[in-house]
Image (cartoon, rainbow, N blue to C red):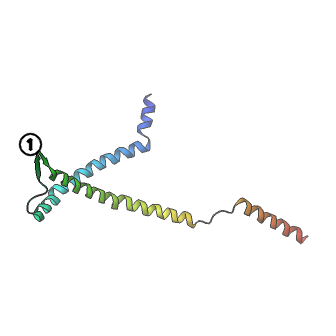
Amino acid sequence: MLKGFRDFLFRGNIVDLAVAVVIGTAFTALVTALGNAFINPLVKAITGGKIGGTFTVVGVTFDYGLFITAVINFVIIAAVVYFLVVVPVQRITNRFKKQEEEKPSAPTDIELLTEIRDLLRAQQGQR
């Protein structure tokens, strides 16, 4: 029972997924810090000291500035993932597809049999 669990944990996909989650969590913290330290102050400087704001409905305050900050963080993460992961993977995939397309295709069975037949006829004609 424990051997099966160990085999499950050390399968390549599970370990890769665990590494991706850890790196993703660290990257999210990095982007959040970037947003709080540089982007939010820049937006505040441009907009006159506000990033979003709040509004109140029936005594409940809604802080839409938090949502704007989350959207900015999402856009940064999405852009980095797209340009550093998706685009390179697409380029590599396209390279392999081109290499596969450039390989000459092997002759079909019918083509091979026709060629053998023609060679046999040519040999019989020489005798």
Q: Residue 99, percent across and down?
A: 53, 65
- Which residue appears at 19% of the width and 55% of the height? 68
The residue nearer to you, when weighing 49 against 42, is 49
Q: Residue 109 sits in which quadrant?
A: bottom right
Q: Residue 53, percent across and down?
A: 11, 54
Instruction: Point out the residue furthest to the right here.
Output: 127
- Which residue appears at 77% of the width and 64% of the height? 114
- According to the image, label 1 marks what residue? 59
The residue nearer to you, when weighing 63 against 29, is 63
Apparent side of residue 45 relative to residue 2 in the rendered image (left or right): left
Q: Residue 70, percent across and down?
A: 21, 52
The residue nearer to you, when weighing 6 against 112, is 112
Q: Residue 19, percent across and down?
A: 34, 46
Rendered view: 3 above or below 126: above
**What amino acid is labelled 1 in the image?**
Gly
- Which residue appears at 45% of the width and 36% of the height? 7
Q: How many marks?
A: 1
Rendered view: 43 above or below 59: below
Instruction: Point out the residue furthest to the top here.
Output: 1
- Which residue appears at 81% of the width and 67% of the height? 119
